[in-house]
């Protein structure tokens, strides 16, 4: 399959890209730094990207920022960034890419486990992740000709924890998380969440 991975240079996106290539898929690697590139926070950048892309079998989005802060310290800017980047960025990558995904193709977006098991200081991240899950559930009803949408909810990733000086041992590495994206790509679920094996909420 020909698959776009948005955020292909990131912790998760790099592992997804590698796994898809290992499985024989053709990957179009994209971020703000590639040529052509896309900034998911900018509608015209998304439109420009899609106008030059042509048809693909899947768009996987593993990009989008959301801010962690205690509720009483959360700023308007942090809220706006989280909504504009992770939430609306991915919503717009789907709705503006409808004609770029072939019949029976799939959009895979990224939420996060906080939608199910929030931690303190994650109110806006949790809001965004839960919002994306609602979007996937409803958007699935509007997709046509066998097209699907799936949301992957990664847990905390070992490499990210390590980068932040936290204990990485409870968490899967990005390569393990990438398997959930492959499942979303190659499976037949629609409007449903997919979890990393061993990290499904109870
Ligand atoms: N890592 C975790 O522990 C974890 C856990 C749960 C959920 N998630 C979610 O998974 C997604 C990816 O996380 P990550 O840790 O892999 O991120 P990351 O390592 O920071 O990488 C982000 C990737 O997205 C690209 N990117 C950033 N902003 C972009 C934009 N506005 N438009 C287009 N591309 C953009 C970056 O490249 P450029 O900077 O070159 O554009 C990079 O390729 C995020 O939505 C995150 O919330 C991550």
Image (cartoon, rainbow, N blue to C red):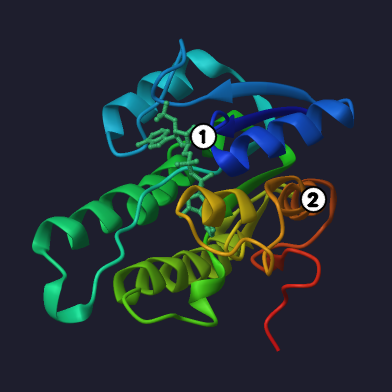
Q: Is mark 2 within 8 Å of ligand 1?
A: no
Dividing the picture into quadrants, the one containing residue 43 is top left
Seen in the image, is 31 located left or right of residue 194? left
Dividing the picture into quadrants, the one containing residue 151 is bottom right
Q: Nearer the viewer, residue 154 or 171?
A: 171
Relative to 20, is 137 above or below? below
Seen in the image, is 155 located left or right of residue 105? left
Relative to 78, is 28 above or below? above
Mark 1 or mark 2: whose residue is earlier in sequence = 1
**Which residue in the protein does label 1 denote?**
7
Seen in the image, is 19 located left or right of residue 127? right
**Which residue in the protein does label 2 denote?**
179
- The quadrant of the picture occupied by the N terminus is top right
Helix, strand or loop at disc 2? Answer: helix
> How many C-alpha atoms fall within 10 Å of the one at disc 2: few (<14), some, or many (≥20)?
some
Residue found 45% across the figure and 73% down from its top: 130
Residue found 75% across the figure and 55% down from its top: 180
Q: Nearer the viewer, residue 29 or 51?
A: 29
Helix, strand or loop at disc 1? Answer: loop
Expressed as whole percent of the image width and height from the top left, the position of residue 15 reads 70, 37
Residue found 31% across the figure and 65% down from its top: 68
Expressed as whole percent of the image width and height from the top left, the position of residue 195 reads 71, 67
Q: Is mark 1 within 8 Å of ligand 1?
A: yes
Q: Nearer the viewer, residue 146 or 12?
A: 12
Expressed as whole percent of the image width and height from the top left, the position of residue 169 reads 69, 64
Residue farthest right in this picture:
23
């Amino acid at each position: 399959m020909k698959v776009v991975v948005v955020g292909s240079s990131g912790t998760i996106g790099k592992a997804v890209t590698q796994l898809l290539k290992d499985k024989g898929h053709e990957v179009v690697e994209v971020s703000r730094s590639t040529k052509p590139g896309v900034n998911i926070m900018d509608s015209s950048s998304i439109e420009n990207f899609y106008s030059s892309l042509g048809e693909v079998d899947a768009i996987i989005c593993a990009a989008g920022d959301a801010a962690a802060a205690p509720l009483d310290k959360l700023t308007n800017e942090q809220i706006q960034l989280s909504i504009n980047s992770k939430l609306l960025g991915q919503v717009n990558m789907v709705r503006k890419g409808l004609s770029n995904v072939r019949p029976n193709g799939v959009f895979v977006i990224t939420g996060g486990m906080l939608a199910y098991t929030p931690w303190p200081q994650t109110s806006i991240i949790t809001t965004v992740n839960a919002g994306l899950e609602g979007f996937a559930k409803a958007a699935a009803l509007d997709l046509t000709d066998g097209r699907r949408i799936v949301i992957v909810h990664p847990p905390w990733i070992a490499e990210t924890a390590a980068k932040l000086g936290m204990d990485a041992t409870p968490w899967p590495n990005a390569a393990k998380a990438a398997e959930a994206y492959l499942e979303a790509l190659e499976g037949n679920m629609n409007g449903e969440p997919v979890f990393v094996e061993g990290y499904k909420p109870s």
